[in-house]
């Protein structure tokens, strides 16, 4: 791997880590006026992000629907049901893990911060939003389905235009994210919270790795009927895709190897070309475990209680729907979730920035888990499709 490619693949994580380290070590040397200005810029970027994301969500949802429809219209319903069921189940499992976190110890570690003077922004912007994410998601899905059924060629052309728009948007946005992170990190350092918060998240990472990867391993064990040799064969076939995913932090980059692995693991290898491209950016086991778990931990770090079950359900539903609008870029999994976490969990700008930073720092582990989960989903899809075909043949014969 060349130095240029190495930087492109891992440079973002280094930038975020450097931002946090800089804020922690040298934030005390920066004047309050400069900190206040940096914090204001961070808030402005967040406002612009929240304002723009509904339009991006619309384009990404439309592209997902068209991609599913153009490649395998007859399988769309099966794919959507399987993906939504899996993502929702994983999101709920993450909630059960998060409420088991010893919140008392986290709150106690943060209890000595009350004497610090809070840093206030130098200026604020209240841009607001023109349309909510919910409406954007629904409109994108409905338009995509309608055009697939009536104007397939137009759907593909619009999808190409929207794809150019989303690539441009993230090309502009990604360089601004470190500014968003470091401005908020300086605020946390000034308030005396950053060092305490950083101490809390190694156990959270360990919980994520054990739970998410253990869950995916259990899936492979179940799919192999607990035959160790068959399970190891499944994992061996998927391993090259996992290595690529870890190095590139991209499910898309690992897609060719994921398809090859699925072709080896499926009884009908032709199904690999349908399910892997369709689910590469929407079926995200790692995201569903990591984001709710870390969000809850961050909320507790700031003294907020975990939401009750009835309050978490609306968040989980919108979290699952928003997964259809995830962009295939480093950090894309968390960027479209910012409005969802803000609206349904009541998270502040500081909390959102911290969740974003932690997500991108550990994106390699998250993406690898996503790709492993997609390998298991391919086997499930193959068996469901073959089962439906067999049932249909039986009905025709009778």
Image: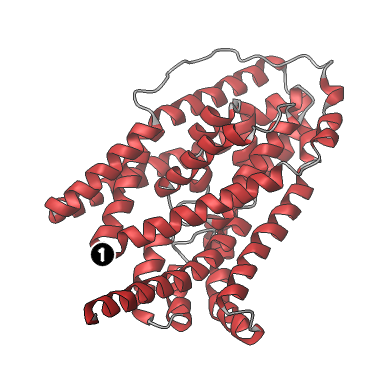
Q: Is residue 281 visible?
A: no
Query: How many dots with numbers?
Result: 1
Task: Give the x, y percent position of residue 211.
Answer: 69, 58
Q: Is residue 103 left or right of residue 42?
A: right
Residue closest to the eye, 374 or 256: 374
Residue at 20% in and 54% down: 156
Q: Say which quarter of the image contains residue 390.
A: bottom left
Percent from the top left, x then y, of residue 214?
68, 64
Q: What residue is pinned by disc 1?
A: 74
Tell me if residue 378 comes above or below residue 134 in the rendering.
below
Relative to 36, does residue 67 appear above or below in the rendering? below
Residue most extreme to the bottom: 229
Label 1 neighbour load within 10 Å: few <14, some 14-19, many 20+? few
Kindly identify the residue that appears in the image at 36 percent across and 47 percent down.
167
382 left or right, relative to 123: left
Q: Nearer the viewer, residue 265 or 128?
A: 265
Determine the image quadrant of residue 342.
top right
Q: Residue at x 28, y 37 (%)?
A: 139
Answer above or below: position of 122 versus 231.
above
Asked if one can make out residue 108 in the rendered structure from this viewpoint, the answer is yes
Q: On the rendered image, what quadrant is the N terminus found in?
A: bottom right
- Give the quarter of the figure containing the C terminus: bottom left
Q: Residue 20: x percent and y percent? A: 70, 38
Q: Secondary structure at mark 1?
A: helix
Expressed as whole percent of the image width and height from the top left, the position of residue 61 reads 34, 46
The residue drawn where x is 43% and y is 59% is 82
């Amino acid at each position: 791997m060349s130095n240029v490619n190495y930087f492109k693949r891992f440079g973002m994580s280094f930038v975020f880590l450097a931002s946090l380290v800089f804020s922690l070590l040298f934030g005390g040397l920066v004047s309050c006026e400069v900190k206040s200005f940096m914090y204001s810029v961070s808030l402005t970027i967040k406002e612009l992000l929240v304002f723009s994301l509904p339009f991006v969500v619309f384009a990404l949802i439309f592209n997902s629907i068209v991609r599913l429809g153009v490649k395998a219209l007859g399988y769309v319903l099966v794919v959507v049901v399987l993906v939504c069921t899996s993502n929702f189940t994983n999101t709920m499992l993450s909630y059960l893990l998060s409420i088991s976190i010893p919140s008392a110890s986290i709150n106690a570690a943060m209890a000595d911060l009350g004497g610090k003077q809070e840093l206030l922004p130098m200026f604020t912007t209240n841009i607001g939003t023109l349309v909510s994410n919910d409406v954007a998601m629904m409109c994108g899905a409905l338009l995509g389905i309608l055009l697939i059924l009536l104007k397939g060629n137009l759907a593909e052309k619009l999808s190409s235009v929207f794809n150019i728009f989303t690539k441009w948007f993230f090309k502009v946005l990604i360089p601004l994210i470190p500014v968003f992170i470091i401005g908020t990190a300086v605020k946390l350092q000034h308030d005396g919270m950053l060092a305490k918060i950083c101490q809390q998240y190694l156990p959270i990472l360990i919980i994520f790795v054990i739970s998410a990867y253990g869950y995916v391993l259990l899936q492979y064990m179940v799919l192999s009927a607990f035959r160790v040799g068959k399970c190891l064969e499944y994992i061996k076939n998927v391993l090259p895709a996992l290595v690529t995913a870890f190095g590139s932090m991209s499910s898309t980059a690992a897609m060719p190897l994921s398809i090859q692995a699925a072709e080896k693991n499926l009884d009908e290898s032709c199904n690999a070309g349908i399910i892997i491209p369709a689910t590469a950016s929407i079926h995200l086991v790692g995201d569903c475990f990591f984001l709710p778990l870390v969000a809850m931990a961050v909320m507790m770090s700031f003294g907020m209680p975990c939401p009750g079950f009835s309050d978490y359900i609306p968040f989980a539903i919108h979290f699952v729907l928003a997964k259809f609008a995830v962009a295939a870029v480093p950090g894309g999994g968390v960027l479209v979730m910012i409005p969802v976490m803000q609206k349904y969990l009541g998270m502040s700008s500081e909390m959102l920035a911290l969740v974003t930073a932690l997500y991108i720092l550990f994106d390699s582990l998250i993406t690898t888990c996503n790709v492993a989960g997609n390998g298991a989903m391919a086997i499930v899809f193959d068996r469901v499709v073959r089962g439906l075909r067999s049932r249909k043949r039986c009905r025709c014969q009778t």
